[in-house]
Amino acid sequence: MQFADLLSKVSYLPPHDVDVLSRAYDAAASAHHDQNRLSGEKFIEHPLSVAGILADLQLDRDTLAAAILHDTVEDTHLTISDLEQSFGPTVGKLVAGVTKLEKISFHSQEQAQAENVRKMLVAMAEDVRVVLMKLADRLHNMRTVNYLPENRRRARNVRQRHQGNSRKGVDRGRYPSRDDRPAEARVQHRQQTCDGQRLR
């Protein structure tokens, strides 16, 4: 996505807000100027695409500016303080929130999933826009996953499947669903049900 494509999506914003997005783009494009994605595209196209996804939802100026700038603190020389001085405290806080969602390591997938849920809930309590930005970031990365090397693509797919399935049955007993139980457990359950019905 090019900046002109993003502009075509933000006609709902007043001209002053569009000017802020233009400044955010200039800052991000300059900071990412020597970085490319695995697809060969300029890196700046990723944050623009994230902003484009959010613009389709007609989110506000600060969210879109933060989306354009969301990788600058982690991948370039810019700091949260720089962003706050240039674009205000809200943009700085949003970028900081997205950055925090990435900076943590775990010993297991279960631990990672539990912490991801916790961090999402905390972020939603502070500002739901942080979560929307992160989801848009993930969505665009999934759309371009084919450019990853095969081993990294396989690892990401396994991780995402695991995160989607892990801990589903925590509140439903030992097995996530009846169909997931061993045959012996299903037979025992049916027998207990029949016995209970005969006793009534």
Image (cartoon, helix red, strand yellow):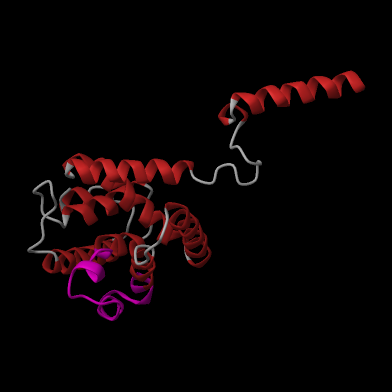
State which quadrant residue 160 falls in. top left
What residue span does the magenta drawing correspond to?
A: 69-92
State which quadrant residue 178 falls in. top right
- Above or below for 196 versus 23: above
Where residue 182 appears, as percent x and y from the top left, is: 59, 28
Left or right, 23 with respect to 167, comes to left
Residue 44 shown in magenta: no
The residue lying toward the viewer, choosing from 198 and 2, is: 198
- Above or below for 159 versus 89: above
- On the question of residue 171 being in view, the answer is yes
Left or right, 164 with respect to 4, comes to right
- Above or below for 154 versus 105: above
Q: Residue at x 27, y 41 (%)?
A: 154
Residue 89 shown in magenta: yes
Where residue 94 appears, as percent x and y from the top left, is: 37, 67
Left or right, 69 with respect to 63, comes to left
The residue lying toward the viewer, choosing from 122 and 179, is: 179
Where residue 157 appears, as percent x and y from the top left, is: 32, 41
Left or right, 114 with respect to 44, comes to right
The residue lying toward the viewer, choosing from 123 and 1, is: 123
Q: Residue at x 56, y 30 (%)?
A: 180
- On the question of residue 144 being in view, the answer is no
Where residue 80 appears, as percent x and y from the top left, is: 30, 76
